[in-house]
Amino acid sequence: MVMAKAVEVLEQVKNAKDYGISFGEATINLEKLNARKKTVTKIHVGGVKSLLEAYGVEVIQGAARFLSSSLIDVVGLDGIRRGLKVRRAIIASGTASAPAYLTGDTGLSIDTDQLLEVSAAPPSILLIGGGATALTFATIFSSLGSKATVIEESDRVLPEIDQEITDLLQRELKKNKIQVLTSAKPLRFFEGSGGEAELEVEVKGEKTKLKAACIVRTARLPNIEGLGVLEIGVALNDHGGIMTDAAMETSVTSIFAAGDVTMNHLSTPVAYAEGLVAAANIAGKKATINYSAIPCWSNTIPAVCGAGLTEAEAKAKGYAIRIGRFPMAANGMATVLGRRTGMVKMVIDEKYGQILGVHVMGHNAPELVHEVLLAMRSELTPLDIADVFHVHPSLSEAFWDAANAADGASINSFSPGA
């Protein structure tokens, strides 16, 4: 996120002339940027540490392994081994970068953790996987001068977000000279020349070789190796993560799991929610997880964010729907900021007026979408959003306009039926 913010600031500086402001040539020092990233991380880790101390939580740093559902073997950083008897436990070990798996990859690729430590932008970068992480890094390194390419095995990127929005995003990426190849299956690596590696890819049935100075694996795996969870009978789900029920309890009574290790949704807000549910149940309360209106987002430029059903999903489920759209080009604040690219799209159930999904591309999209997420969780309608006074000019007005457009009553864009 720090790198994405740095690129956004760089772009603002480059466009400052549009506001009558002149600078010299703007550049980024990656070593100083990495130092800033580490400072931000240190601040927040320190904050969590202080909270744990305030609540009297004992923190043991080391390697842990379940010997049974009630006994955990821990080897501390000091080398001292101890056994912990527990009545209940929560596994929240997150994910780890997937190791190299393709034939010929003898150190020719790196993972995203290693990418975060590079001291200079490579002349070319190829990212395997068309998810939010790959697209965000493609945007970042393209802005830093790298020739960026993204390959995705499925027929589209970001499937959780409406295709109308992702099509807009791909057009913007193309304008910024970022190549996105869908239906592209990576096959094997070859040693390249001139500091580049080669990746053989099958794109829509045809084989081709792509060259890049830096090839990045973006896949993640549940971080369970060495934990002993399989040995004590903890079951895995179809995604390879730890399987849980709605109370976040695993197949082993008294052992719970939360966060990315479940591989249900690789998302911080979901991890928070799962952790709270697991903790509540351990404390003897009755809590279950609610996975409705989970946002999916990408910190590309422009950013995208979506939650709920896409238009295609809603139709496939048999809903009669109507759509509320509003272009960011018609939003006053977007014009002030020079960020007129994008759109707000709401998918609405025709029968009851329930908002089934919201999908956005535009400046600060992940920061703006929450009023609609709240409306979705509260089963409010576009009319409820349209009745709320919105600050003018503001980017969030685009949601007010999209809500009005859903009823053919937008005053800031053409709206049939108004």
Image (tube, grey):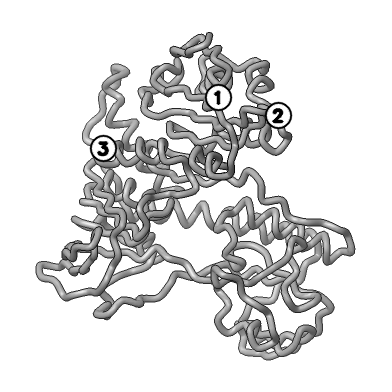
Residue 32 visible in the displayed image: no
Checking the image for residue 380, the label placed there is 2
The residue that appears at 24% across and 80% down in the rendered structure is 104
**Label 3: element kind:** loop
Q: Is residue 65 left or right of residue 2?
A: right
Depth-wise, is mark 1 or mark 2 nearer the camera? 2
Residue at label 3? 26
Q: Amino acid at mark 3?
A: Ala
C-alpha span from label 1 to label 3: 34 Å
Q: Is residue 343 left or right of residue 249?
A: left
Disc nearer the start of the sequence (1/2): 2
C-alpha span from label 1 to label 2: 14 Å
Q: Amino acid at mark 2?
A: Leu
**Label 2: element kind:** loop
The residue that appears at 19% across and 55% down in the rendered structure is 123
Q: Is residue 257 left or right of residue 36?
A: right
Residue 389 in the image: above or below residue 90: above
